[in-house]
Amino acid sequence: MSEQKSLNPWHYKPWWCQPWSILLTAVTLISGSWFVFKTIWLTVLVSIPVLIWMGFFLIIWPQLMIRSGALESEQSQGKLI
C-alpha cells in the first residue's frame, strides 16, 4: 500500500493542477456561463469541452501515468517531473 501511495501522480503536479483546482475551475466556468448568459444552449456548449477536459485530467491522465511506469522510473532516479 505504501508503494501505491508513493506512485500518486498528483505529487508531481503543481498546486494549480491538482484535482481540487481542476474541479473548481470547471464548476466556475460552467456556472459562470449560466450566470452571465442565462442561456441553456450556451451553457451546454461551454460545459461539453470543460467536462471533457476535466474528465481527462481527473480520470484518464492519472491512470495513464501509473500504467506507463514513468512514475516508477522517475522515483528510482530521484527526479521530479
Image: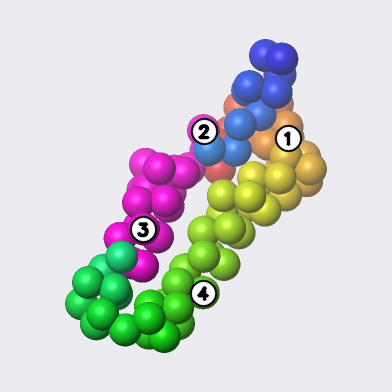
Task: Name the residue nearer the viewer: 54 or 62.
Answer: 54
Q: Position of residue 8 (x, y in %)?
A: 61, 31
Circle nearer the N terminus (2, 4): 2
Q: Which residue is mark 4?
A: 48
Residue 11, numbered label: 2
Mark sitting earlier along the chain (2/3) = 2
> Which mark is first along the chain, 2 or 1?
2
Task: Determine whether the residue tagged by mark 4 lies in a helix, strand or loop.
Answer: helix
Instruction: Determine whether 49 is above or below 62 in the image.
Output: below
Mark in front: 1 vs 4: 4
Residue 75 at x, y percent in the picture: 66, 28
Q: Residue furthest top?
A: 2
Q: Give the magenta part as a residue range.
A: 11-30
> What is the number of callouts on the image?
4
Of badges 1 and 2, the one in the foreground is 2
The residue tagged 1 is 73
Q: Does 11 sit left or right of 20 as displayed? A: right
Q: CA–CA distance between discs 2 and 4?
A: 28 Å
What is the distance, in whole Å, between disc 2 and disc 3 at their CAs? 23 Å
Q: Quadrant of the C terminus?
A: top right
Q: Taking the image as drawn, is residue 14 in sight?
A: no
Residue type highlighted by circle 2: His
Q: Is residue 60 magenta?
A: no
Distance in Å between CA atoms under marks 1 and 4: 35 Å
Residue 6 visible in the shown view: yes
Residue 20 in the magenta stretch? The answer is yes
Type of amino acid at the residue the image marks with label 3: Val
Who's the residue at 36% across and 58% down the image?
A: 27
Label 3 belongs to which residue? 27
